[in-house]
Amino acid sequence: MSSSKHTIRNRVSFMEQQIPAYAPILGILGILIVWEVACRLEIVPPLFLPAPSLILSAGWEMLSSGELHQNILASLYRIAVGYAIGAVCGIVFGLILGFSRWVDAILSPIVYSIYPIPKIALLPLIILWLGIGETPKFTMIALGVFFPVVINTFSGVKNVDPIWIKAAVTFGSSHFSVIRKVILPGALPMIFAGLKLAAGTSLLLLVAAEMIAAQQGVGSMILHYGNLMITTKLMVGVLILSILGLLFNRGLGWLERKLLPWK
């Protein structure tokens, strides 16, 4: 019996071991080393997949000329505005859906029927409605963010334990207080799940919109160098998108830890 308890304790201790902060870096470095060696040995033609050292050299050249930061700033501006609009509208609408059975019964079928439509397919129609400029790009990104946030917020509200709500009402909490102190905190984990899911979607739609209807931006830059078959500079754009995705995820994770310390 004692031996069994000791074995279980060892397994739990092993599972709770802290992962070193440098562990994720090891995986990235390993991939870069294998990638560089494969390119140096010409296992992969440089035109198809340039070595990381050549990509970094091209990135430094683009940074020195000012080309890179202009495209990054244009993309960051678009994604910041579109993401903020989509996230705020999605959270508010998801809370309304979760609180009102009438709104849920009337609008939920509409939300779930529009959600599977590829948003990029709507871009020509959005351009027709809103004209050529930044507004269609903001709208595309906002639509891509809106639906995952709405659905996750709605699910989060519905999954709040009814016992918590009954306990708050029993102790005399007002309707607004129950929403602010019980339902909203209880739904936050699902809301953040939706925000993280929407972050990847927003990058995807940003690139697609910039490739179709933009003169500046990371997506436009990738398309331009792809047409010229300058793959080193094309891969610089892909690397930037990867970094932006990582920063998005880390930033939302940090915000989640601050707002949900109990989680």
Image (cartoon, rainbow, N blue to C red):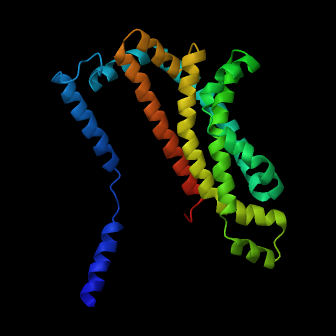
- Do we see residue 259 in this rendering? no
Image x and y of residue 226, in percent: 42, 14
Apparent side of residue 262 relative to residue 124 in the rendered image (left or right): left
Image x and y of residue 111, in percent: 71, 43
Rendered view: 22 above or below 160: above
Image x and y of residue 105, in percent: 79, 53
- Do we see residue 21 in this rendering? yes
What residue is shown at x 31% (from left), y 78% (from top)? 9
Apparent side of residue 189 relative to residue 24 in the rendered image (left or right): right
Residue most toward the left?
Answer: 41
What residue is shown at x 30% (from left), y 19% (from top)? 48
Which is more toward the observer, 235 or 98? 98
Tell me which corner region of the image, top left, top right, bottom left or bottom right, holds residue 234.
top left
Tell me which corner region of the image, top left, top right, bottom left or bottom right, holds residue 242.
top left
Tell me which corner region of the image, top left, top right, bottom left or bottom right, holds residue 39.
top left
Give the quarter of the figure containing the N terminus. bottom left
Which is more toward the observer, 125 or 70? 125
What residue is shown at x 69% (from left), y 61% (from top)? 158
Give the quarter of the figure containing the C terminus. bottom right
Rendered view: 161 above or below 97: below
Q: How many callouts does the rendering have?
A: 0
Apparent side of residue 98 relative to residue 38 in the rendered image (left or right): right
Image x and y of residue 228, in percent: 40, 8
Which is more toward the observer, 79 or 106? 106
